[in-house]
Amino acid sequence: MIRLNNLSVDFAGNIIFKNISLQIKKTDKIGLIGNNGSGKTTLLNLLSQKIIPTSGSISEDRGIKIAYLPQELYFNSNVSLKEFVVGVNSELIELDKKIDQINEMLNKEQVEKNQFKLLEELEEAQYRKDKINILKLEINAEKIMKGLGFVGADFTKDINSFSGGWKMRAELSRLLVLNPDILLLDEPTNHLDLPAIIWLEKFLNSTKCTIVLVSHDTKFLDKNIDRVFEISQNTIKDFKGNYSQYIIYREKEIERQIRQKKIKISI
């Protein structure tokens, strides 16, 4: 789905990543492990295309939908909670605009190769529009909002009337309703109580989307990942397994390094 190709990131001489190459595959559930400042959030920003690498490249499958929940949110929208979470009207408007634009381009395009490309884009846009079932989306949105702690009376409240923590829940609800191909989560449990955390665990375990997760809640991390990216010293080590299995591996690796060091000293 996403491939990092010999990627490096340098912020004013501060090297974050150097010559990283790896692949994120469909249905992967990846936990990002590393000290504060090691580059976990930087990697999420790269994957969500909020920043670009200093060198190298990121390639992704065509048409994949990426949703990103950062630690800090900055939005000001004068709509109700339900309108914010569902967000159907704006998506339909954008799709209709795109379909009109493609049809207009088709009428003017004379090159057959370009016509085929435009027809593919038109088919994809129409498919996305057909998939939008407003009633089904609203029902699903209400289930998700309630799962994350909202009640029915909250649905018609202005989104700006909620505190920062509840706005974060609203944004998480919106992203889950989108049903993305890849879900990037940076400390999603920070503003959740236990019932909401348990609900989110069940949701993540049942979803088919690819997940890339940062969390200091090791129990939550353990239950929701099957692959670990250890970020350290400007590189990323890829480990297959959950957090507990990764810890056992790291302990054995440290013991092995100590034994090797003792052997070298004795020689």
Image (cartoon, helix red, strand yellow):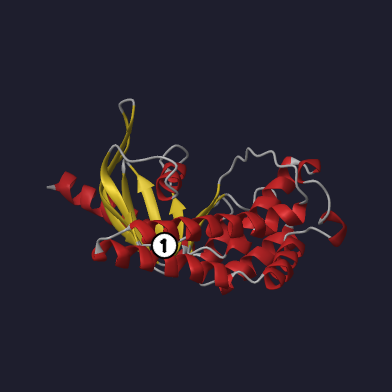
Read off the residue under disc 1.
63
User: Residue 74's x, y, as percent?
Assistant: 63, 37
Please tell me which residue is depicted at 41% across the width and 62% down the height of the picture: 63
Is 261 in front, or is 253? Answer: 253
Please tell me which residue is depicted at 29% across the width and 57% down the height of the picture: 22
- Horizontal side of residue 158 vs 1, given as left or right: right
Please tell me which residue is depicted at 57% across the width and 72% down the height of the picture: 131
Determine the residue located farthest toward the right in the rendered image.
153
Q: Residues within 10 Å of mark 1 (few under 14, many from 20)?
A: few
Is 195 in front, or is 158? Answer: 158
User: Residue 45's x, y, as percent?
Assistant: 45, 44
Q: Report how many numbered discs are placed on residues in the image.
A: 1
Amino acid at dot 1:
Gly
Badge 1 element: loop
**Residue 57 versus residue 127 in the image, above or below:** above
Camera sees residue 212: no
Is 40 in front, or is 83? Answer: 83
Camera sees residue 235: yes
- Horizontal side of residue 156 vs 123, given as left or right: right
Is 68 in front, or is 85? Answer: 85
Determine the residue located farthest toward the top in the rendered image.
12
**Residue 34 versus residue 204 in the image, above or below:** above
User: Residue 246's x, y, as percent?
Assistant: 41, 61
- Horizontal side of residue 32 vs 129, given as left or right: left
User: Residue 116's x, y, as percent?
Assistant: 31, 68
Please tell me which residue is depicted at 80% across the width and 46% down the height of the picture: 158
Please state, as top left, top right, bottom left or bottom right, where the N terminus lies in the image: bottom left
